[in-house]
Image: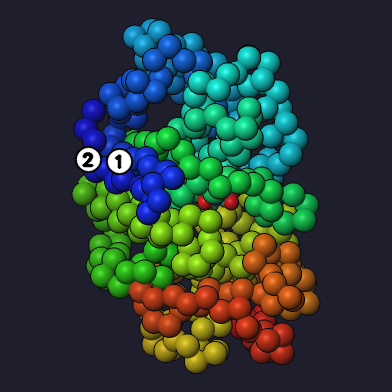
């Protein structure tokens, strides 16, 4: 296997330390770098249903069987239904029952292999079963490779809102295999780019220019562009979560566009036919730029350039791009108040004060917000 890049995620007080490997053969990376962790252990491989749908599960099982034969470990396989509407208590309970019924112990390893839904659900299960069992993430969507597999946020959705039940639980390792992107549906791939662009908006103007310049090569997954943007995204995320694991400060900027996105996703009841997470983030970021200019924090010129970049990735940028739903400012406001970050009826927005820089705003008054939302709905 070629490990093309490696990133260390380590925080100041060294309470966590793990590596993100970016390459093109996850099973070899696993064998080479995690043999001590896996030797003689019970391994629970929880995989995304796409393996089954694309008839790839038999190869997956064979690959893991080879590793376990060499390392004297024992494998248990479980298929997860992906899609956000299944990231819930029911599916968590079924997963936990499976794991417990196969007599998991504190030494066991849980491996999640799939998109962000699989990773969030499996990460959460790992953090609570026996009060915490080691977990390795093998993300298979672009979104999960650049975002959800790194940083230790786990969780499920409830009818009260998105990701409202969960934990901070860092994995033992993240293995990013770029080959997985070859089977990813185009819509999912583009949705993943929303989170990639986000890092450039909030943190790195040079990265923004790189994306602007190389957009066509990036979209076609050309080498070395795709490796570079995954590396750059993971590095920015790793840097931020290493400083602020539990989102007491700077980590909040990673939620750029997400106050809006979570409200949209809740409004459509997590129906992936209408909107998937990355698309919601794309519209959410465009809204965040518009609110930033409305509040004179960001120039119209820069906001326009950023919204154009979102569009060039064939991602939606407007409320009217959400099909099959009538949105009112009252409905949106109600959804904003479901957000975890609401304090004393004040909603937190992450806004932009120019390309490559973001700020946390938790004093947007309701009058300004209503006026802005009315403008947004009518555009
Ligand atoms: N924990 C975090 O920090 C964090 C950050 C961002 C997003 N998230 C969460 O991640 C979730 C979204 O993740 P996602 O966009 O990966 O969605 P997803 O997990 O639903 O996967 C999208 C679709 O792609 C399929 N798929 C996955 N890999 C594939 C592959 N290689 N080839 C073909 N099909 C494949 C899946 O079966 C699914 O149908 C949301 O629940 C969101 O809240 C979490």
Badge number at residue 326: none
Is mark 1 in CB contact (under 8 Å) with mark 2? yes
Compared with residue 178, is residue 242 higher up or lower down, i.e. above or below?
Answer: below
The response on whether ligand 1 sits within 8 Å of label 1 is: no
Helix, strand or loop status at disc 1: strand
Residue at mark 2: 4
Per the model, the C-alpha gap separating discs 1 and 2 is 6 Å
Q: Residue at x 68, y 86 (%)?
A: 365
Quarter assignment of residue 215 = bottom left
Residue 323 visible in the picture: no
Helix, strand or loop status at disc 2: strand
Q: Residue at x 34, y 40 (%)?
A: 19
Position of the C terminus by quadrant: bottom right
Residue at mark 1: 22
Position of the N terminus by quadrant: top left
Q: Nearer the viewer, residue 71 or 311?
A: 71
Residue 293 visible in the picture: yes
Q: Residues within 10 Å of mark 1 (few under 14, many from 20)?
A: many
Report x, y in % for residue 334. Answer: 77, 71
Outermost residue, bottom side: 296
Report x, y in % for residue 187. Answer: 49, 51
Report x, y in % for residue 122. Answer: 58, 35
Report x, y in % for residue 297. Answer: 47, 88
Compared with residue 79, is residue 61 higher up or lower down, i.e. above or below?
Answer: above
In the picture, measured across the screen, residue 16 lies left or right of residue 88, that is: left
Q: Earlier in the sequence, mark 1 or mark 2?
A: 2
Compared with residue 256, is residue 272 higher up or lower down, i.e. above or below?
Answer: above
């Amino acid at each position: 296997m070629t490990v093309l890049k490696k990133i260390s995620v380590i925080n100041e007080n060294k309470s966590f330390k793990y590596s993100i490997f970016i390459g093109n053969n996850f099973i070899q990376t696993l064998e080479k770098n995690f043999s001590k962790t896996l030797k003689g252990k019970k391994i629970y491989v929880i995989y995304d249903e796409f393996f089954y749908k694309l008839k790839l599960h038999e190869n997956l099982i064979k690959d893991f069987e080879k590793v376990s034969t060499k390392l004297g470990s024992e494998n248990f396989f479980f298929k997860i239904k992906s899609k956000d509407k299944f990231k819930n208590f029911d599916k968590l309970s079924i997963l936990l029952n499976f794991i417990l019924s196969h007599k998991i112990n504190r030494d066991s390893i849980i491996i999640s292999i799939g998109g962000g839904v699989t990773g969030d659900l499996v990460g959460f299960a790992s953090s609570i079963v026996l009060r915490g069992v080691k977990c390795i993430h093998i993300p298979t969507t672009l979104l999960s490779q650049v975002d959800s597999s790194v940083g230790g946020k786990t969780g499920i959705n409830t009818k009260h809102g998105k990701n409202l039940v969960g934990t901070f639980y860092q994995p033992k390792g993240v293995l990013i295999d770029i080959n997985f992107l070859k089977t990813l549906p185009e819509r999912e791939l583009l949705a993943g780019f929303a989170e990639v662009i986000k890092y450039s908006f909030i943190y790195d103007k040079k990265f923004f220019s790189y994306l602007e310049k190389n957009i066509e090569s990036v979209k076609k997954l050309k080498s070395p562009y795709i490796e570079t943007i995954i590396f750059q995204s993971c590095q920015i995320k790793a840097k931020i979560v290493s400083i602020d694991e539990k989102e007491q400060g700077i980590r909040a900027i990673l939620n750029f566009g997400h106050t809006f996105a979570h409200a949209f996703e809740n409004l459509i009841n997590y129906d992936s036919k209408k909107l998937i997470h990355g698309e919601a983030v794309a519209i959410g970021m465009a809204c965040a730029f518009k609110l930033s200019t409305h509040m004179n924090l960001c120039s119209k010129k820069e906001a326009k350039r950023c919204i154009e970049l979102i569009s060039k990735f064939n991602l939606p940028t407007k409320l009217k791009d959400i099909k099959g739903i009538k949105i009112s400012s009252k409905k949106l406001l109600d959804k904003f108040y479901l957000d975890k970050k609401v304090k004393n009826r004040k909603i937190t927005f992450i806004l932009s004060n120019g390309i490559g820089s973001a700020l946390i705003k938790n004093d947007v008054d309701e009058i300004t917000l209503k006026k802005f939302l009315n403008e947004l709905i009518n555009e």
